[in-house]
Image (spheres, grey):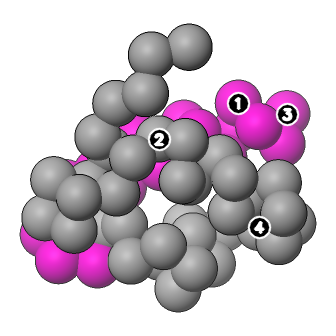
Amino acid sequence: MEDIEICHCNNVMKSEIIKAIKEKGLTTVEQVQDATDAGTVCGSCIPDIEEILTSVNG
């Protein structure tokens, strides 16, 4: 898997988001924001975070 930067404002990588979702049982964008800071500045990556949540959690 190629690791890509999901949140450019806070330099959060896809692998960091996936790890947080799996380790902490995250189910919402807000939980991912709290755990990783992704999506907390401009918000343009929120659709990507939602897609990752769906992919990981089914």
Residue for badge 1: 55
Mark 4 vs mark 3, foreground winner is 4
Pinpoint residue 31: horizontal percent, then vertical percent.
63, 78
Residue 45 colored magenta?
yes
Label ID, residue 25: none
Q: Is residue 39 left or right of residue 16?
A: left
Marks 4/3 in contact by CB < 8 Å: the verdict is: no
Q: Is residue 38 left or right of residue 43?
A: right
Q: Is residue 50 visible?
A: no
Which quadrant of the figure contains the N terminus? top right
Residue for badge 2: 14
Give residue 24's quadrant in the image.
bottom right
Among numbered discs 4 and 2, the one appearing first in the sequence: 2
- Callout 2: SS: helix
Residue for badge 4: 26
Which span is picked out in magenta? 40-58
Marks 4/2 in contact by CB < 8 Å: the verdict is: no
Among numbered discs 4 and 3, the one appearing first in the sequence: 4
In space, the residues marked 4 and 3 are separated at their CA atoms by 12 Å
Residue for badge 3: 58
Pinpoint residue 30: horizontal percent, then vertical percent.
54, 78
Pinpoint residue 7: horizontal percent, then vertical percent.
26, 54
Mark 4 vs mark 2, foreground winner is 2
In space, the residues marked 1 and 3 are separated at their CA atoms by 5 Å
Q: Is residue 33 visible?
A: yes
Q: Is residue 27 left or right of residue 28?
A: right
The residue type indicated by label 4 comes to: Leu
Residue 20 colored magenta?
no
Marks 4/1 in contact by CB < 8 Å: the verdict is: no
